[in-house]
């Protein structure tokens, strides 16, 4: 019989990291003061321009990220349930 190893902790870590990233994506603007972070020169102007144009991409990235996070959670939960059922079945014998 083949052994299937599902890294539950790694899946949980991936879900958590993705949730944290989505929190940033969901913010309306680049956090903090752009001028303080990048200055008011070409880099600061480019950062402000990127922030203004980022709107639709932010929506798509958030939606797709949430779908991926939900899939990760479904996989983790399903394998955890299978494992718990297998243990219960063996203990019942």
Image: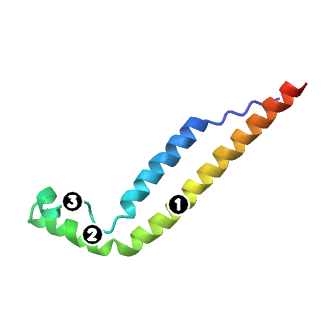
Alpha-carbon distance for marks 1 and 3? Answer: 25 Å
Alpha-carbon distance for marks 1 and 2? Answer: 21 Å
* Mark 2 element type: helix
Q: Which residue is mark 1?
A: 66
Q: Residue at x 12, y 58 (%)?
A: 36
Q: Where is 34 relative to 8, above or below? A: below
How many other residues sit within 10 Å of disc 1, few (<14), some (14-19) or many (≥20)? some
* Mark 3 element type: loop
The earlier-in-sequence mark between 1 and 3 is 3
Q: Residue at x 21, y 65 (%)?
A: 47
Q: Where is 33 relative to 54, above or below? A: above
Direction from residue 82 to residue 27 in the image, left or right: left
> Disc 1 vs disc 2: Cβ atoms closer than 8 Å?
no
How many other residues sit within 10 Å of disc 2, few (<14), some (14-19) or many (≥20)? some
How many numbered discs?
Answer: 3
The earlier-in-sequence mark between 2 and 3 is 3
Q: Which residue is mark 3?
A: 32
Direction from residue 70 to residue 1 in the image, left or right: right
Picture quadrant where residue 59 is located: bottom left
> Disc 2 vs disc 3: Cβ atoms closer than 8 Å?
no
Q: Position of residue 35 (x, y in %)?
A: 12, 63
Q: In the rendered view of the protein, which quadrant contains the N terminus?
A: top right
Q: Which residue is mark 2?
A: 51
Q: Residue at x 51, y 45 (%)?
A: 14
Q: In the rendered view of the protein, which quadrant contains the C terminus?
A: top right
């Amino acid at each position: 019989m083949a052994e299937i190893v599902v890294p539950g902790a790694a899946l949980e870590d991936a879900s958590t990291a993705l949730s944290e990233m989505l929190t940033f994506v969901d913010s309306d603007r680049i956090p903090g003061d752009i001028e303080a972070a990048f200055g008011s020169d070409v880099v600061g102007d480019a950062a402000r321009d990127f922030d203004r144009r980022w709107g639709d991409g932010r929506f798509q990235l958030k939606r797709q990220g949430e779908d991926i996070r939900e899939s990760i959670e479904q996989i983790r939960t399903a394998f955890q349930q299978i494992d718990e059922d297998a243990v219960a079945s063996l203990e019942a014998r």
